[in-house]
Image: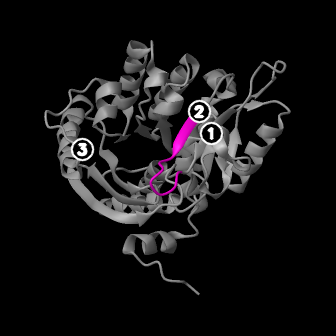
């Protein structure tokens, strides 16, 4: 087993996150010509944590709430419905132009029309996340956590959240908690903060046991030289990722597992979905297979959630990529942007290509 975990931990997984709402037009319509929308609670990090939480593992979310906000109440109820514990400060709104929770404006696309997503994050309360709001000694020392999952989205959201994620990684390391880091580079988050974020992301990566991202993520977040081979087809992407992992492993030798997904878009509702991982020096590849897509948003997070769940469950490393591939595929069949597996059998049925009715 290449990665072992604390056995005295209350929580299997902990995620820091800035929570918000996702607005999606009904019936697969574009946002700009719709008048009916579904409202969902969302965040990239809780998308990942949903896979282990729905499959019975204890999960905790560290976040911030706008005090007395009905949106905050909706978020709390949703997290509780996803079987997640949560903790965080209640921040005064400060008037109509004060704090609020983020909005994600997302249509699902249909057929030849691809999805479009716009983030509306002005005044986002999650930007103030800070270690001063949390007792890290209690959380990591007394309660205990097996793995903390960090995303480059919360890691780059603001100077405060960047420091927060770094301090979480340091506390996790000090208490024997494993660290998963999905780099998730976003150019708009990094603008005018390149050196600051490079230094923080590099330190987190140096402590991480699991690093997730494609070649561009490793280049832009960590400054790792990219492979010479270019190209967009799947075979070239896999070779480029293999070259990149060799370089990343040399720069960050503590990391044991590396992973990225592979996606070819046939239409908004038909994708070829694959993945490639390296665990303890051994490569595992799922060649892209065609899947049906109801809403593609969250597929990558679903993969990470399943990959980490299989790891936490003690499955053989070759099963990690299979389970992650299947939970990622499952996420694309939900209208929510997170996977809600009924049980492991459902996940393995997806992996096996068995979509027959179960009575």
Q: How many marks?
A: 3
Q: Are marks 1 and 2 in contact (CB under 8 Å)?
A: yes
Left or right: 39 in relation to 349: right
Q: Magenta segment: does it hold 106?
A: no
Instruction: Give the distance between the C-alpha atoms of the residues marked 1 and 2, in whole angstroms.
Output: 6 Å
| Label 1 secondary element | strand
Left or right: 297 in relation to 29: left
Q: Residues within 10 Å of mark 2 (few under 14, many from 20)?
A: few
The residue under label 3 is 232
Closer to the chain start, of discs 1 and 2, is: 1
Closer to the chain start, of discs 2 and 3, is: 2
Q: Magenta segment: does it hold 113?
A: yes
The residue under label 2 is 119
Q: Quadrant of residue 159?
A: top right
Task: Looking at the picture, tell me which residue is in the foreground, 146 or 95.
Answer: 95
| Label 2 secondary element | strand
Q: At which x and y percent is residue 217?
A: 34, 33
Residue occupying the point 44% across, 33% down: 173
Q: Residue furthest bottom?
A: 359
The boundaries of the magenta stretch are 109-118
Q: Residues within 10 Å of mark 1 (few under 14, many from 20)?
A: some
Residue occupying the point 41% across, 31% down: 185
**Residue 13 seen anywhere in this rendered image of the structure:** yes
Residue occupying the point 60% across, 47% down: 30
Instruction: Give the distance between the C-alpha atoms of the residues marked 3 and 1, in whole angstroms.
Output: 28 Å
Instruction: Give the distance between the C-alpha atoms of the residues marked 2 and 3, in whole angstroms.
Output: 27 Å
The residue under label 1 is 105
Q: Quadrant of residue 315?
A: bottom left
- Looking at the rendered image, the quarter that the C terminus falls into is bottom right
Q: At which x and y percent is residue 190?
A: 44, 20
Left or right: 75 in relation to 317: right
């Amino acid at each position: 087993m290449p990665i072992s975990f604390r056995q005295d931990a209350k929580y299997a997984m902990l995620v820091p996150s800035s929570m918000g709402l996702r607005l999606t037009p009904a019936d697969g319509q574009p946002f700009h010509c719709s008048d009916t929308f579904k409202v969902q609670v969302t965040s990239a990090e809780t998308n990942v944590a949903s896979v282990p939480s729905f499959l019975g593992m204890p999960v905790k979310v560290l976040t911030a709430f706008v005090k007395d906000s009905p949106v905050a109440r909706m978020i709390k109820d949703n997290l509780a419905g996803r079987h997640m514990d949560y903790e965080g400060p209640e921040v005064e709104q400060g008037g109509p132009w004060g704090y609020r929770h983020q909005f994600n404006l997302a249509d699902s696309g249909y057929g030849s029309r691809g999805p479009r997503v716009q983030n509306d994050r002005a005044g986002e309360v999650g930007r103030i996340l800070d270690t001063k709001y949390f007792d890290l000694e209690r959380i990591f020392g007394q309660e205990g956590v097996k793995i903390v999952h960090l995303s480059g989205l919360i890691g780059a959201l603001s100077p405060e959240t960047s420091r927060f994620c770094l301090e979480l990684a340091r506390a996790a390391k000090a208490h024997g908690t494993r660290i998963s880091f999905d780099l998730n580079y976003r150019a708009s988050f990094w603008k005018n903060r390149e050196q600051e974020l490079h230094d923080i992301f590099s330190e987190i990566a140096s402590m991480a046991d699991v690093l997730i991202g494609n070649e561009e993520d490793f280049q832009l977040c960590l400054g790792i030289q990219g492979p010479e081979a270019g190209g967009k087809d799947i075979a070239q992407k896999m070779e480029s990722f293999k070259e990149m992992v060799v370089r990343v492993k040399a720069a960050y030798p503590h990391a044991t597992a590396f992973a990225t997904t592979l996606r070819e878009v046939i239409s908004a509702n038909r994708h070829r979905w694959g993945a490639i991982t390296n665990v303890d020096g051994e490569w595992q590849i799922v060649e892209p297979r065609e899947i049906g897509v109801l809403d593609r948003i969250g597929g990558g997070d679903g993969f990470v959630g399943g990959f980490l769940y299989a790891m936490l469950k003690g499955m053989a490393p070759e099963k990690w990529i299979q389970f992650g591939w299947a939970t990622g595929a499952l996420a694309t069949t939900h209208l929510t942007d997170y996977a809600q597996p009924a049980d492991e059998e459902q996940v393995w049925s997806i992996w096996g290509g068995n979509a027959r009715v179960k009575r």
